[in-house]
Image (cartoon, helix red, strand yellow):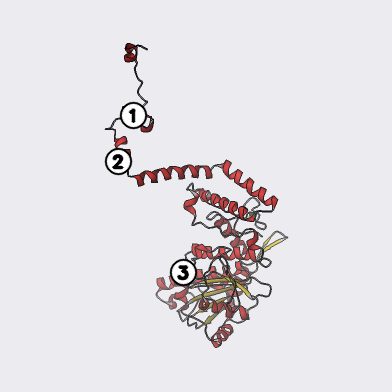
């Protein structure tokens, strides 16, 4: 090619949208603000931006339906083979994180939602040593801890919920000291015997609060009908427990509680004599115990029943505190005839609810299942089953598997 021809060649400039790295070197505009910003960027900042781009791409992959379907296919394949439990557990945990990322309409990266821990985190061999029904009980108890936190009733390490799990009724589940109620899961609950000795540590190395467990131990020892105990001292419950009048029959909620026991609790039950006194005060049938100046305890033959009574007791205490603050004193309140109305209101509450001719809900079950469906919308959990009693045939009840 001649020199004249070479001089006649016109080089086409790069399109405006082309990045700096794609432009001809001799065509870089050193006064371009974008070029100056990139040139003056610190290496650390440039690395951070590159990492953000990589994370964005990973998030897009994880959230793609095709990837989720492929992962679920791998899990099902491993389940059929019945081997490699470690690899299967890893796949299951990844799937849980991906489920978490899509809960409640969130589009955030699943890595940023790691604090939303599945309630049912039991997989494979972890649950093989449990007694019959323990897995379900663990999931229900962890769910109840989450609900108490959700309602704003938690008091750090000073409130406890326990459940008996063994046939012999001498093993009890409790959350270890150091975990918030929002962190409760099926696997981190500690199993202890009736005097507080650890039987199963769970997945943490944290210990239980023996002083907090002592009233539970005393109640379980003399009330074989009680399987679940909830102890709260919310501001309203503690306020009413400090009133000489106790829980007044000024609301339907107070009447539903039935007979209420009272005990001058001093903070712990170190002496055997104090435990005996508590047992005498509680009696053989009361479902609600007011610990003077300390709070309220509710008992139940099931977790659902215990929740029913603690929820109702909390409402009764809130109503009473509000009524006294507005009325100026007990003398200005309309106090209901306890003996006249108690049998009717309590009878309706404990009578159960019939669902056709075949099914009947026990105390608190109907409401508790609705709360489990609420938790399904807030947290990601592993096992999926349909509710069997409520008629929500197409609704997933994810919090536990029967």
Is 306 or 160 nearer to us in this picture? 160
Q: Mark 1 points at which residue?
A: 25
Asked if marks 1 and 3 touch (Cβ < 8 Å), the reply is no
Q: Where is residue 302 in the image (x, y as percent from the top left)?
A: 63, 69
* Location of residue 158 with respect to 399 vertically, above or below: below
Calculate the distance from the C-alpha at mark 1 to the C-alpha at mark 3. 63 Å
* Location of residue 35 with respect to 364 vertically, above or below: above
Left or right: 48, with 253 as reference point = left
* Location of residue 44 with respect to 321 vertically, above or below: above
Is 320 or 74 nearer to us in this picture? 74
Left or right: 55, with 171 as reference point = left
Q: In which quarter of the image is residue 22?
A: top left
Calculate the distance from the C-alpha at mark 1 to the C-alpha at mark 2. 18 Å
**In this view, the mark in front (1 or 2):** 1
Is 8 or 107 nearer to us in this picture? 8
Which structural element holds mark 3?
loop
- Residue 116: which disc? none
Q: Name the residue under label 2.
A: 40
Q: Where is residue 223 in the image (x, y as percent from the top left)?
A: 63, 79
């Amino acid at each position: 090619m001649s020199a004249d021809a070479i001089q006649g060649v016109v080089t086409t400039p790069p399109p405006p949208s082309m990045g700096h790295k794609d432009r001809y070197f001799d065509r870089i505009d050193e006064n371009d603000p974008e070029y100056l910003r990139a040139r003056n960027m610190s290496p650390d900042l440039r690395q951070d931006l590159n990492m953000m781009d990589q994370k964005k791409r990973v998030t897009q992959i994880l959230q793609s339906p095709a990837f989720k379907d492929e992962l679920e296919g791998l899990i099902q394949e491993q389940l059929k083979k019945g081997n490699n439990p470690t690899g299967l557990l890893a796949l299951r945990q990844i799937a849980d994180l991906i489920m978490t990322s899509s809960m409640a309409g969130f589009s955030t990266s699943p890595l940023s939602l790691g604090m939303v821990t599945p309630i049912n985190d039991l997989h494979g061999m972890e649950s093989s040593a449990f007694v019959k029904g323990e897995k379900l009980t663990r999931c229900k108890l962890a769910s109840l801890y989450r609900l108490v936190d959700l309602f704003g009733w938690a008091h750090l390490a000073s409130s406890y919920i326990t459940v008996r799990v063994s046939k012999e009724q001498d093993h009890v589940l409790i959350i270890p000291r150091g975990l918030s109620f929002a962190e409760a899961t099926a696997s981190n609950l500690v199993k202890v015997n009736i005097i507080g000795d650890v039987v199963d540590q769970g997945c943490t190395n944290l210990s239980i609060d023996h002083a907090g467990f002592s009233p539970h131990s005393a109640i379980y020892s003399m009330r074989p009908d009680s399987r679940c105990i909830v102890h709260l001292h919310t501001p309203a419950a503690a306020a009413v427990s400090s009133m000489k009048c106790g829980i007044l029959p000024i609301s339907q909620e107070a009447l539903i509680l039935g007979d209420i026991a009272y005990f001058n609790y001093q903070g712990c039950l170190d002496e055997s004599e104090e435990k005996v006194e508590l047992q005498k005060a509680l009696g053989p049938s009361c479902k609600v115990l007011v610990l003077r100046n300390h709070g309220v305890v509710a008992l139940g033959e099931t977790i659902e029943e215990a929740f029913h009574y603690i929820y109702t007791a909390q409402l009764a205490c809130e109503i009473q505190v509000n009524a006294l603050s507005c009325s100026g004193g007990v003398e200005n309140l309309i106090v209901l005839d306890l003996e006249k109305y108690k049998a009717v209101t309590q009878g309706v509450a404990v009578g159960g609810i019939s669902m056709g001719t075949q099914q009947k809900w026990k105390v608190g079950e109907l409401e508790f299942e609705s709360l489990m469906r609420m938790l399904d919308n807030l947290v990601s959990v592993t096992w999926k089953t349909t509710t069997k009693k409520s008629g929500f045939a197409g609704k997933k009840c994810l919090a536990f598997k029967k």
